[in-house]
Image (cartoon, rainbow, N blue to C red):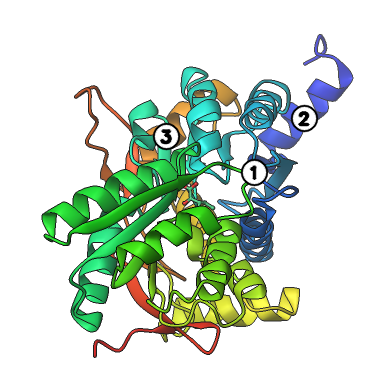
Amino acid sequence: MRFLPKTLALVSALACAGLAQAADIKIGVAAALTGGAAQYGVSIRNGFQLAAEEINAKGGINGNKIQLVIEDEQGKKEEGINVFKKLIFQDKVLMVFGPTLSNSMFAAGPVANAAKTVVFGTSVTANGITDIGPYVFRNSVMESDVLPVTVATATKHYKLKKVAVIYGNDDAFTKSGYDVFKKVLEDQKLPVTTTETYVKGDVDFKAQLTKIKGSNPDAVVCSCLAEEAANIMLQARGLGIKVPFIGGNGFNSPKLFEISKLAGEGTFVGSPWSNTNPAPANKAFVASYVKKYNAEPNQFAAQAFDALHVAAAALQEVKLSGDVNTDREALKNALPKATINGATGPFKFRAAVTKTGKPGGWDADQKPFIYVVKGGKFTAFDGK
Ligand code: 1QQ
């Protein structure tokens, strides 16, 4: 003991006496807090902060408090990569949540996977995300699990015979959503009257909508982010298109109604979260969210909230060594078995089925709720 530096001697003395300070668990959150995707990213950050506060108030994880390191990736690929590098190599976080968009995940996810650091998406729904590698996890439900249900439900309800399609062809999520819609429409034998595209930043969709109107569909299928979807809806009504819309995960933002007002009435959409789900975990989440933020939560907040609880469930089972590489690997091995009963209901992972057959990451194993838009609000579809 005589030869040890003073502070080290003190630490080891405390450790011997069982008084060593519990360490914080640093967890990175990369979310789009500014720019167009902030309509999703701000809710995501709120969900994480609420979950971290609650977990820490109950004593943390095996006595260790969670410390969130939150960065704005602006919904841009390059910023996603920059922020991931900072969190992983500079801050040396145990794991990273995010980014908000699939488009950014395809760029930033490989950075985390190569650094053998868990990256956990809470809002990324495109096909192929978990093909990036074994360190990639998500609790966001893939469009390929949700859209077949959404389309089948809308088809039955409206007795659809043919639909038009519109999508953004330069975003990984809207493009992948289109690929899924195309396959679902083929599988469900619903003919397509016309397929129209736009690119990021477009605000005038009248040329595409005029073609859609001329093709006389019974509904318009839209693989779009919320802001574009809302403008498409408004302009469609302006052109006299009266048929309902069918959308994907991009629709699940209150922004849709802020812009479209009542233009989206009758829209069908699927989501893994229901605001009216009476399960105790969801009621508790909604109540504490409203108390903290003085606003209603949405799906993106619920998924972020649940994601931290999933990570916490895995971390309960990990004996942290203090060596970041060892601990990152231990978390990656514990995470696939983590299950919770959360705001989005019972959650578990399933191993990704990759295109290459190489080992991939882990996808969400959850079923969607179906909603129809009534009075400018998502309303649980009652099956009639
Ligand atoms: C994706 C999405 C978006 C709607 C996330 C906010 O599902 O990019 O995958």
**Looking at the image, is mark 1 or mark 3 earlier in the sequence?**
1
Q: Amino acid at mark 2?
A: Val
Residue named by callout 3: 136
Of 68 and 161, which appears nearest the observer?
Answer: 161
Identify which residue is drawn at 18% across, 59% down: 191
In the image, residue 309 lies at what x, y percent? 50, 58
Indicate the quadrant where residue 214 lies: bottom left
Residue named by callout 2: 11
**Looking at the image, is mark 1 or mark 2 earlier in the sequence?**
2
Residue named by callout 1: 29
**Looking at the image, is mark 3 or mark 2 earlier in the sequence?**
2
Identify which residue is drawn at 38% across, 61% down: 212
In the image, residue 289 lies at what x, y percent? 65, 75
Q: Amino acid at mark 1?
A: Val
Q: How many tags in the picture?
A: 3
Specify whether 283 is left or right of 158: right
Identify which residue is drawn at 53% across, 90% down: 375
In the depicted structure, whether residue 74 falls above or below residue 187: above
| Eye-nearest disc, 3 or 2 | 3
Task: Say if disc 2 is inside 8 Å of ligand 1.
Answer: no
Q: Amino acid at mark 3?
A: Val
Of 148 and 190, which appears nearest the observer?
Answer: 190
In the depicted structure, whether residue 129 falls above or below residue 247: above
